[in-house]
Image (cartoon, grey):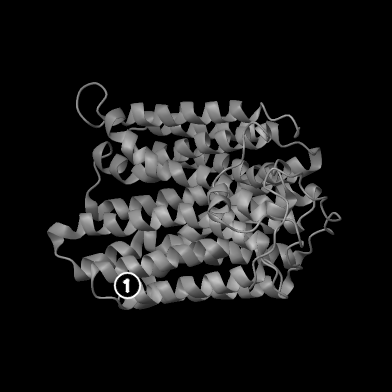
């Protein structure tokens, strides 16, 4: 692959004229985008949810497992947050004869698969860290190219529906990853290899059905340290709609992270389930949530495309997520918890169905779609690191250290604020 080497307009120069509007996305392309998203997320989520903890337990004494797992996951989270916009920026600039997305789809997922092999076969924590770092960097290189497929290849009138289909693949990957981990519990190496192989199949199919082109000559400044830093930045002064969308996404994912990060401890501390029981309860709640995510994604995307409006659906979705968080906050029985997860999941599905479509509409420069989508990805990745830092203080509000009501109320308020932030966007209805 080749990155533009010659001098070009500075980052502050006007964006080049966008190319002709893409043709209506074919069923093959939509399936390819969804399959690639599913495969990449399956390869990254299965270790995070289940198999990395089991792999660490195989090679680390029991007293050291928690800290060792934390080291591996923390390194991966940081690299994922850095890698997505950086590889997106490099993808935007790539002038390969195979296009600007295909090399990063195939090369990224191949590197990710190699990293998963290292994790599966490594025998020490440093080796696991090395393997997981490679898996995260490679997977996020591929993911940045997948996400760019929506603004690159899908016309505005289809983006809600397509975004909903792609968005719900993350939730489907969570369920399938859990099933695969259980299926290969007697051969843990396969629990890493099989998701990685599915990721390779997904991006391979996408590259075979997508239209791709090299970067536009002269569209970018030479890649330098300044351009590297610019991979993480879009000026809120010059592009206020992008900034409001980033703020809204960040706040909504703060609310979402409150549930995804603390549902296990909630079930144990408030509802009294043992360590042996809680995994089954989490699976039931997750299945109910994913079913609701799928329903919300398909409904929201279809209605949003028909109406041509995005902001009302983001507002409604954020309020539904907040209602689900409040239900969790007041739940004192498992059936109420499952109901709360259904409400929460339906709201998340509605949000995912229009969030990417809204993001695609406020991108500053069509030539830098992968980089800018990577910047937006920080808005949903950063809360996963920040919420665990803030949560202990919220849980300690009042007497004791289990005030889940305060934690989930905080998440609900964040979602409402996120919904309000999006309403300040002017260029999208």
Q: Is residue 336 left or right of residue 297?
A: left
| Residue 249: image location, x then y, percent | 56, 38
Q: Is residue 402 above or below residue 53?
A: above
Tally of numbered discs: 1
Q: Is residue 124 above or below residue 250?
A: below
Q: Which residue is painted at 29% across and 62% down in the image?
A: 53
Q: Which residue is painted at 62% across and 32% down in the image?
A: 244
Residue behind mark 1: 185
| Residue 16: image location, x then y, percent | 79, 50
Q: Is residue 403 visible?
A: no
Which element is circle 1 on?
loop
Q: Bin the neighbour count of mark 1 within 10 Å (Cα to Cα): few under 14, some 14-19, many 20 and up.
A: some
Quarter of the N terminus within the rendering: bottom right
| Residue 116: image location, x then y, percent | 40, 72
Q: Which residue is painted at 29% across and 71% down in the image?
A: 127
Quarter of the C terminus within the rendering: top right
Q: Is residue 336 visible?
A: yes
Q: Is residue 58 left or right of residue 199?
A: left
Residue at the front extreme of this rendering: 7
Foreground: 343 or 199? 199
Q: Is residue 21 left or right of residue 105?
A: right
Q: Is residue 120 above or below residue 320?
A: below
Q: Is residue 20 left or right of residue 56?
A: right
Foreground: 286 or 15? 15
Could you say which quadrant of the image residue 26 lies in?
bottom right
Q: Which residue is painted at 57% across and 34% down in the image?
A: 248
| Residue 384: image location, x then y, percent | 41, 45
């Amino acid at each position: 692959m080749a990155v533009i080497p010659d001098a070009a307009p500075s980052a502050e120069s006007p964006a080049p004229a966008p190319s002709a509007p893409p043709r209506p996305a074919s069923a093959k392309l939509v399936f390819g985008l969804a399959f690639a998203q599913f495969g990449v997320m399956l390869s990254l989520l299965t270790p995070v949810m289940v198999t990395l903890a089991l792999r660490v337990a195989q090679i680390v004494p029991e007293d050291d497992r928690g800290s060792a797992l934390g080291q591996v996951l923390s390194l991966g989270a940081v690299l994922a947050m850095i890698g997505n916009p950086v590889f997106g920026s490099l993808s935007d600039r790539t002038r390969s004869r195979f296009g600007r997305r295909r090399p990063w789809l195939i090369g990224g997922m191949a590197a990710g698969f190699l990293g998963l092999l290292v994790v599966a076969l490594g025998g020490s924590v440093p080796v696991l860290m090395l393997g997981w770092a490679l898996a995260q960097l490679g997977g996020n290189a591929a993911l940045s190219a997948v996400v760019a497929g929506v603004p690159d290849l899908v016309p505005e009138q289809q983006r809600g529906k397509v975004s909903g289909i792609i968005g719900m693949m993350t939730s489907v990957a969570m369920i399938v990853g859990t099933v695969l981990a259980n299926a290969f519990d007697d051969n843990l190496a396969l629990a890493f290899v099989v998701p990685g192989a599915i990721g390779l199949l997904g991006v391979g199919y996408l590259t075979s059905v997508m239209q791709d082109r090299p970067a536009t000559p002269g569209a970018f400044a030479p890649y330098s340290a300044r351009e590297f830093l610019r991979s993480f930045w879009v000026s809120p002064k010059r592009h206020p709609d992008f900034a409001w969308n980033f703020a809204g996404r960040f706040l909504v994912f703060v609310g979402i992270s409150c549930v995804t990060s603390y549902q296990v401890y909630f079930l144990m501390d408030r509802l009294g389930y043992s360590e042996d029981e809680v995994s089954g309860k989490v699976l039931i709640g997750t299945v109910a949530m994913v079913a609701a995510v799928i329903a919300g994604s398909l409904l929201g995307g279809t209605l949003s495309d028909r109406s041509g409006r995005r902001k009302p659906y983001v507002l409604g979705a954020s309020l539904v997520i907040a209602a689900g968080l409040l239900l969790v906050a007041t739940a004192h029985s498992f059936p109420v918890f499952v109901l709360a997860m259904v409400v929460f999941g339906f709201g998340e599905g509605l949000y995912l169905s229009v969030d990417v479509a809204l993001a695609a509409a406020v991108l500053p420069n069509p030539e830098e779609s992968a980089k800018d989508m990577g910047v937006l990805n920080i808005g949903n990745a950063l809360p996963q690191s920040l919420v665990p830092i803030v949560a202990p203080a919220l849980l300690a509000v009042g007497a004791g250290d289990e005030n889940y009501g305060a934690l989930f109320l905080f998440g609900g308020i964040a979602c409402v604020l996120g919904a309000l932030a999006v309403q300040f966007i002017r260029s999208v209805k």
